[in-house]
Amino acid sequence: MLDTVCGETDQRDVASRLTEVLSGMRLDGSFYIGYPIIASADEKVIVDTLLLTEQHGLIAFIFSSSMPLPNDPAAWKRLQDDQDRLFFAIDASLSRHYGLRSGRRLGVGMETITLFPTTPALPNDVEGKFVGLDNVQSVIRTCAPVDAAYRRPLVRSSPAGNDYQAAEETGPCDQT
């Protein structure tokens, strides 16, 4: 069963559509909408949605309503930089937890995905994962699960913190 935990987001409609897609996948875990990951030295980093499942691990989504043209490398680079910024913010946040480390590194793999309304036409040299709502399920299925040894510490260190228990007690997100 996939539990949905809501924070603040200006993109509730996209989050709702992604929630519908995920509900058809029969996932076990948590789906966090609009939670701050960490306040870095430069900025507060907020994740649009974060999916944590036994089957496909930790996936952070960035929503993008406008899709760059394939021949606009600067726009694709900005999107890639956004993914990198989010990846490193999550990595820094999770690395503080001893139970999530393997030696000197984070023991948990993660993915960052930029989500568009439809599947983008990608340029050849773009790095990162960029998908549309129409094919997000197939991309999620390629993501590796979290090792069983890290599942409990990862849930405890989730971005929702103590809000997770409150959300379980109050029910699903308000979709208004």
Image (tube, rainbow, N blue to C red):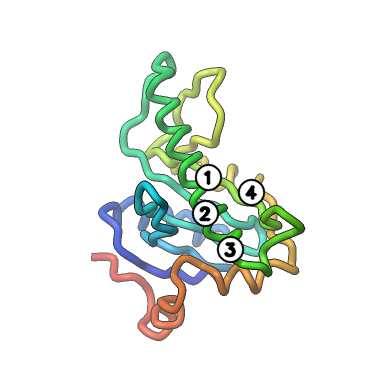
- Say whether residue 6 is visible: yes
Q: Residue at x 63, y 57 (%)?
A: 57
Instruction: Decide: is 168 above or below 136.
Output: below
Whether label 2 touches label 4, CB < 8 Å: no
Tag in front: 4 or 1:
1
User: Residue 91, image x and y in percent?
Assistant: 57, 53
Tell me the tag on residue 90.
Answer: 2
**Mark found first going from the N terminus, 2 or 3:** 2
Tag in front: 2 or 4:
2
Taking the view exactly as shown, the residue that stands out farthest to the front is: 41
Whether label 4 touches label 3, CB < 8 Å: no
Return the residue at label 1: 112
**Mark found first going from the N terminus, 1 or 2:** 2
- The type of residue carrying mark 3 is Arg
Tell me the tag on residue 141.
Answer: 4
Q: In the rendered image, which quarter contains the N terminus?
A: bottom right
Q: Quadrant of residue 73?
A: top left
